[in-house]
Amino acid sequence: MASGLKENLSVVVHGKGDLRLENTPIKTPGNNDALIEIKSGGICATDIHLFLTGNIGSLVAKKPYIPGHESAGQVVKVGENVKHLKPGDRVAIEPVVGCGRCTECKLGNYQRCDVMTICSIPPHDGNLTQYKVHNASFCHKLPDNVSYEEAALLEPLAVVVHAVRRAGVSAGDYVMVCGAGPVGLLCMQAAKAFGASHVVVTDIVDHRLETAKKLGADFTVNVKNKTDDQIREEIWKPLGGKQPRVTVECTGAEAAVRIAILATMQGGVVSLVGFGDDQINVPMVQISIRELSIQGIYIYANSYQLSIDLVSQGKIKMKPIITHRFKLEQALEAFETSRTGKDNALKVMFNLE
């Protein structure tokens, strides 16, 4: 236990739908680690899925675990090899840590490391806890004008920054974003920040589309109960008949993936950010005859500092996405609010300060 610290209230999942509050041990940081007092944390769709089903694909929760991978806090103690951080520093915690030894890690693609650790993904504990030990190289110092809440949301922002950058979005591009949840709303802003001149956002919920407009979407389309042809027409018409060169699909829903393929211009890019069912039906022939590039996106790499800069410079607005705030003691209510979208919930956050 770290000196002087006695309690570590944590959210602990013991099985499908079984969430409890417990005091867990406070670990002592190793030579390359930092002990962080968590100040803010978010709930992600991945957290909800794992909580309800007990697995993420082949990753199965075989023992109790602490959820949460969107977090930020203050450094309490650092290991003897850590020189870039000191107690009192405000940091965002990047939850993905590669081994640093494999070929992909050495190339900078640590999101492809076969033995990487991800906070909250079995068998590794997450960050919905008062104190967390983490590899200090993946703790990023924050400028004064980035709050702990905003810093916690750097994790989903890093995902879309990675996607937009990998898709090659640049000045003048026409971009479509499927889904106006927290990830889609961040993606729309990231596309704008990278130079897209027109961004159209689709969803089936009007209040989410209204938020997209407030945050800078040029056009929005509610795709609920419409045919593929109707949806394509409503996407292309406000673009003057032009088609998106890049589409970022943020829902994982089969219907949205299909529209992403059908509505993107020939030779364009479809970036798959959303995680849905393992097997879905898609128009494969259209991918071939229109020479679309389909890009899978799994987390991110080397995207945190750029994400910090975009928020610090005011190019990405986080606060309008945060709709609900809870104390750690209200964990069950917070998870239920995030799961159901109660009261028009977008991003549900924990405030531990």
Image: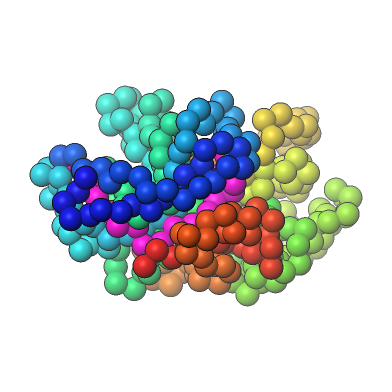
Residues shaded magenta: 32-50
Residue 248 lies, in percent from the top left, at 62, 49
The colour scheme used here is rainbow
- Tally the numbered discs: 0
Q: Does the magenta segment cover residue 195?
A: no
Residue 131 lies, in percent from the top left, at 31, 52
**Which of the image's four quarters has the N terminus?**
top left
Quarter of the figure with residue 320: bottom right
From the viewer's perspective, tell me whether residue 84 is left or right of residue 120.
left
Question: Which residue is pictured at 10% across the width and 44% down the height?
Answer: 80
Residue 86 lies, in percent from the top left, at 16, 57
Question: Which residue is pictured at 74% across the width and 46% down the height?
Answer: 256
From the viewer's perspective, tell me whether residue 22 is left or right of residue 47.
left
Most foreground residue, 72 or 266: 72
From the viewer's perspective, tell me whether residue 203 is left or right of residue 339.
right
Residue 276 lies, in percent from the top left, at 67, 39
Q: Is residue 6 above or below residue 325?
A: above
Most foreground residue, 306 or 287: 306
Is residue 39 visible to the viewer in this orientation of the structure?
A: yes
Most foreground residue, 128 or 169: 128
Question: Which residue is pictured at 83% across the width and 56% down the height?
Answer: 224
Q: Does the magenta segment cover residue 37?
A: yes
Most foreground residue, 308 or 239: 308
Q: Is residue 246 above or below residue 63?
A: below
Residue most toward the left? 80
Is residue 289 visible to the viewer in this orientation of the structure?
A: no
**Which of the image's four quarters has the C terminus?**
bottom left
Question: Which residue is pictured at 29% across the width and 72% down the height?
Answer: 144
